[in-house]
Image: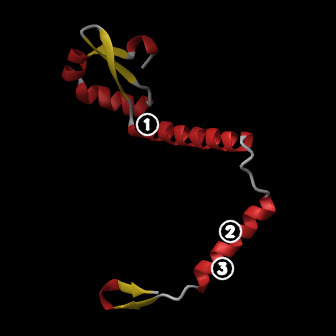
């Protein structure tokens, strides 16, 4: 679907839902649906939506990291690995005894 054909009124969506879903899924291009001449919603395939959500999550992590760097909230690589090793060791040292019915005691 070209951008010029990627805008359809809701009546077209209602009348051609199966065809549009097939086309959107195959092309992975979004469709803008209008109602009363105004753009109201975007329809896109699931893979594209999931990729967009993953991209947004990564951008949020990068922004948070950048803000932490500006605030001086950073650790050296050695300090980070040392803390991680301590946490792994503490986790391994815990003794967990499980009894029937999946009840665990520490």
Q: Residues within 10 Å of mark 2 (few under 14, many from 20)?
A: few
The quarter of the picture where residue 18 lies is top left
- Judging by the rendered image, the residue that carries numbered circle 2 is 84
Tell me the quarter of the picture where residue 39 sits: top left
* For residue 84, above or below residue 17: below
Q: Position of residue 60 (x, y in %)?
A: 57, 40
Residue drawn at 71 percent across, 49 percent down: 73
Q: CA distance from mark 1 to mark 3?
A: 39 Å
- Please say if the residues under marks 2 and 3 sit with CB atoms less than 8 Å apart: no
Looking at the image, which is closer to me, 40 or 102?
A: 102
**Residue 49, numbered label:** 1
The mark found on residue 88 in the picture is: none
Query: Mark 3 or mark 2, which is nearer the start of the sequence?
Result: 2
* Few, some or many residues within 10 Å of mark 1 (<14, 14–19, 20+): some
As drawn, is 22 to the left or to the right of 53?
left
Mark closer to the observer (2, 1): 2
Lateral position of residue 43 relative to residue 10, left or right: right
Quadrant containing the N terminus in the rendered view = top left
Q: Which residue is mark 3?
A: 89
Q: Is residue 19 left or right of residue 72?
A: left
Residue drawn where x is 39% and y is 35% of the image: 45
Q: Residue 105: give x, y in percent of width and height.
A: 42, 87
Q: Position of residue 90 (x, y in %)?
A: 62, 79
Estimate how packed mark 3 is, as few (under 14), some (14 to 19) or many (20 or more) residues with alpha carbons within 10 Å. Answer: few
Q: Nearer the viewer, residue 3 or 74?
A: 74
Q: CA distance from mark 2 to mark 3?
A: 9 Å
Measured as percent of width and height from the top left, residue 44 is found at: 38, 30
Q: Secondary structure at mark 1?
A: helix
Residue at the (24%, 17%) spot, across then down: 10
């Amino acid at each position: 679907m070209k951008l010029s054909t990627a805008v359809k009124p809701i009546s077209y969506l209602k009348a051609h839902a199966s065809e549009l879903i097939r086309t959107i899924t195959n092309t992975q291009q979004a469709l803008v649906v209008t109602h009363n001449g105004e753009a109201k919603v975007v329809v896109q395939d699931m893979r594209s939506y999931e990729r967009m959500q993953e991209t947004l999550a990564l951008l949020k992590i990068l922004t948070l990291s950048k803000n932490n760097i500006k605030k001086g909230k950073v650790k050296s690589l050695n300090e980070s690995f040392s803390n991680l090793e301590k946490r792994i060791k503490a986790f391994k040292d815990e003794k967990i005894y499980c009894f029937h019915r999946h009840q665990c005691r520490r």
